[in-house]
Amino acid sequence: MTARGHRLRNRLMLAFAVFALAVAGLFGLYVAVFVYSVEDRFFDAMLEQEAQQQLDQRATRGTWSPPRNAFMTIHDSPATFPSDLKAAFDAEPWRREMAGAQGRHYHLRAVTPDGAGTPGWLVAEVSQQLVVRPMRSQILALWPGPAWPW
């Protein structure tokens, strides 16, 4: 094979390799976004089910019941939130997903009873149930950074 043929072959191989890496990177990004979305929707669905149970309890007995899941709590107002959540909520009250101190992660849902009743807040501290976010730090630890010799 001539030198020109080698150059063409090398350029084609490089083009295919770059294309394969680009497709793999795009697919990896899509998977990461998809998994984050599924995980968040899972927590939102759990909060929705618990909120409906709390509303039913409030309608029949007039009080909130202890949530079925140990990682959820019901609050009469944001004033009773955990301190790290309260600070984040006071800064951005429209958000329904917030990071807390020491790796804690919260999902919130307002629970508003029909008729005359004070609304409550359902708070899920989901840091122990997270799958994707803890893996993110493990993956980033493998990424070659400036401290590596190459």
Image: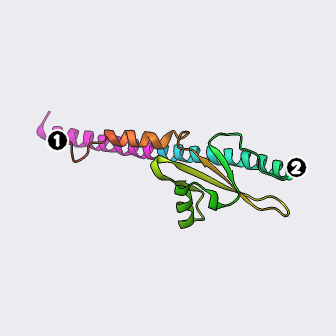
| Front one among 56 and 118 | 118
Residue 10, by quadrant, is: top left
For residue 104, which numbered disc appears in the image? Answer: none
| Front one among 18 and 133 | 133
Q: Quadrant of the C terminus?
A: top left
| Front one among 39 and 123 | 123
On screen, 4 above or below 106?
Answer: above
Q: Badge 2: how crowded within 10 Å, few (<14), some, or many (20+)?
A: few
Amino acid beneath label 2? Thr
**Residue designated by label 2:** 60
Amino acid beneath label 1? Pro
Say if mark 2 contacts mark 1, CB within 8 Å: no
Question: Horizontally, is 112 left or right of 91 in the view?
Answer: right
Q: Quadrant of the N terminus?
A: top left
Residue at position x 59%, y 65% in the image: 93
* Residue 65, image x, y percentages: 76, 46
* Residue 56, image x, y percentages: 83, 49
